[in-house]
Image (cartoon, helix red, strand yellow):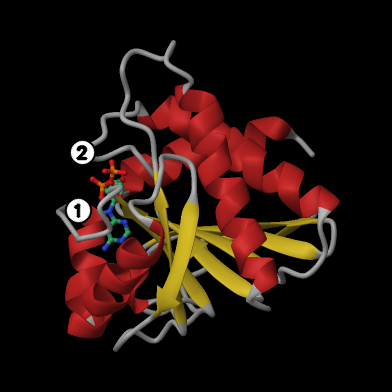
Amino acid sequence: MQILSNFSTIKYKGVNKMAFSVTIGKSKLTLVVGDITKQEVDAVVNAANSSLMGGGGVDGAIHRAAGPKLHEECLEIVKKQGECPTGEAVITSGGNMPAKYVIHTVGPIWHGGSSNEPELLAKCYENSLKLAIKNNIKTIAFPSISTGAYGYPVEKAAVVAIKSVKEFLENNDGIDEVIFVLFNDAIYKSYESVLKSLNL
Ligand code: ADP
């Protein structure tokens, strides 16, 4: 693992305060504290619900920032293929956000850990990254999926998130940078300690 930068404040837009990057294969994996709706990346990932009709948390923030076009595109998808199952992902435009695309994925609701939550959460990251490659997306920002309203403990979710992305980047070329945009310092610290503990 090559550490490129630590506690950088210059590279990312929005309210980012901290950043930490490593290289994995041909890609960069970065952690920042910030607001995902402000990221200047090809795609931001939305922690959606199956209906794709918006909600609270990061979903609400993305729909507000993107504008009504996002809701219309989501409606079209649901009309065509039905609701989005947990672990799967679909793509729309980014509406009025700096990002060109939104990849909507549905994280698992935490039921205590023995209802396939880790496998389903890993699928969210894998399927989002697969869809990114299919759409020639080079830079992609993820929130901490499932760790808000869906109740997945952050320390556990961070392990699944980092390991899934790491494994994908080791086995697939095409993505230049994955950025985890974490909403506060506590979430950031959880992700940072997992990434550092991997000792790549
Ligand atoms: P879920 O239903 O998957 O748990 P939530 O939106 O409730 O989704 O929470 C997922 C994570 O997104 C939480 O860590 C929350 O703090 C974070 N979050 C909320 N708003 C934003 C935002 N604008 N940018 C980045 N992360 C956000």
Residue 134 place in picture, x, y as percent: 68, 70
* Label of residue 149 in the image: 2
In the rendered image, the quadrant that contains the C terminus is top right
Using the image as rendered, state which of residue 77 and residue 131 is in the foreground: 77
Instruction: Identify which amino acid the numbered label 2 is placed on.
Output: Ala
Q: Is residue 40 left or right of residue 35?
A: right
Position in image of residue 81 (x %, y %): 41, 59
129 horizontally vs 3: left or right: left
Mark yes or no: residue 193 visible.
Answer: no
Q: Nearer the viewer, residue 54 or 26?
A: 54
Mark 2 C-beta closer than 8 Å to ligand 1: yes
- Marks 2 and 1, how far apart in space? 7 Å
Q: Quadrant of residue 161?
A: top right
- Residue denoted by label 1: 57
Asked if ligand 1 lies within 8 A of label 1, the reply is: yes
Decide: few, some or many residues near mark 1? Use Cα within 10 Å; few <14, some 14-19, many ≥20.
few
Which residue sits at x=42%, y=46%? 188
> Quadrant of residue 72 in the image?
bottom left
